[in-house]
Image: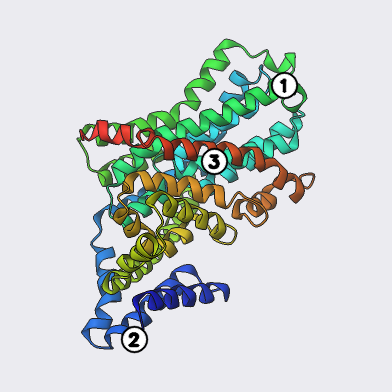
Amino acid sequence: MSYEAIALTMFASMMLMLMTGQRVFGAIGAVAAVSAMLLWGAGPGGTDIPFAAAMKLMKWYPLLTLPMFIFMGYVLSESRIADDLYKMFHVWMGPIHGGLAIGTIGLMVLISAMNGLSVAGMAIGATIALPELLRRNYDKRMVTGVIQAGSSLGILVPPSVVLVLYAMIARQPVGQLWLAGVLPGLMMAGLFVLYIAIRCRLQPHLGPPLAADERDVPMREKLRLLRAGLLPLVIFAAMMWPFISGYTSLVESSAIGAITAFMAAVVKGRMTKEVFEVSVRQTLAISCMFMWIIMAALGFGAVFDGLGAVRAIDDLFTEQLGLDPWTILILMQLSFLLMGTFLDDTAMLVIVAPLYVPLVKVLGFDLIWYGVLYTITTQIAYMTPPFGYNLFLMRAMAPPQIGLKDIYASIIPFVFVMILALALIMAFPEIALWLPNYVYGK
């Protein structure tokens, strides 16, 4: 059997297992282990691959950053420090057309800097911002799209947990990937704000300003809320500054972030037994999930490396089909859009990483830059009708007056904005690469 046929059989087997409802790590890991034993026998050759993947995972020192960042995010969200953020944007941005929607994008940017998971941003936006926006007569489709689009920043703005996962699978420096996500994340947030401002300027009924009595907030109270809202930025700076300056490693900085967030909750009197227990339980659950997924992906990738399938597929695309590298890259991005109809971003990465990441390198593209493209494309994928992952998550969190039709319609203009951001980063790679190159002196 040819290498291409073996690779196709492995992918088909994995997709078949996923369709039966198996967990992602179970489907990928089982196919990797069985394929290794069938190809190289039950002796040392076949059994060494899954065992080596487990040992590589256990020795991967940067993996310690995952539980630290996840714990930091849950402490800040469960202690309701995010509430202070929204109150700050409420009083400072409310007087202008679409101001609360613009403030919600700002909230999402800061939530992303606190948590690194898009689901957390979605949950906080749906529970804190959405009821307030609807109560103040904002258009339901506008605000539903704002929250879904804003939550997409969670896997791009550091400390993105998904970029940590990509870094481990693609064997790229986490710090460079985080820095690569900063300018694209802020650019995309700026494009969202620009769209909201222009749309609400042209159609004022979509985002009316706050009533005069609600705008009448004493300056002393505004400044107090500003200080409270800036707390997550202080925590982020305390974590990132020593890392970027070279005083601490990434793992040490993640520990600083977790400790600082914990102390902030204690000082504000919000670190209750319930908050601590929920934060620890969720940290353990999500960390274990990521560890299983990474181990499965490493085993699957090792089989592909042993087969030399990447070179064979590169030869198929470039030599036999005559496709140029950019065409292949675009086809890869389109495949993410297809997979996003039934998989989340983590599952998409671990399924295609063994093939796509080495192929991107062979084609001559920068893997740091591609990591940013991956995060944006996958986020577009599962916000796109009809089966986008985020659409159904939003439906579960939204109030009854917001139907699935509203959710579908709400995200369309924001998807076009994200496609524009993706096109800009593809056309001008320095948007993603300038900051890591500057900081690391390349």
Q: Is residue 88 above or below residue 392?
A: above
Question: Which numbered dot is residue 202?
Answer: 1
Q: Which residue is under mark 3?
A: 419
Which secondary structure, mark 3?
A: helix
Counting residues from the start of the chain, the first of labels 3 and 2 encountered is: 2
Labels 3 & 2 near each other (Cβ < 8 A): no
Give the mark toward the camera: 3 or 2: 3
Which secondary structure, mark 1?
A: helix
Q: Which residue is under mark 2?
A: 38
| Quadrant where the N terminus is found in the figure | bottom left
- Residue 312 appears in the figure: yes
Tell me the amino acid under the disc marked 2: Leu
Q: Residue furthest right?
A: 401
Q: CA distance from mark 1 to mark 3?
A: 23 Å
Give the quarter of the image for residue 360: bottom left
- Residue at position x 50%, y 51% in the image: 378
Which secondary structure, mark 2?
A: helix
**For the residue carrying disc 1, how many other residues have a C-alpha within 10 Å: few (<14), some (14-19), or many (20+)?**
few
- Residue 304 horizontal/vertical position (percent): 32, 70
- Residue 86 appears in the figure: no
- Residue at position x 57%, y 11% in the image: 219
- Residue at position x 59%, y 31% in the image: 104
Counting residues from the start of the chain, the first of labels 1 and 2 encountered is: 2
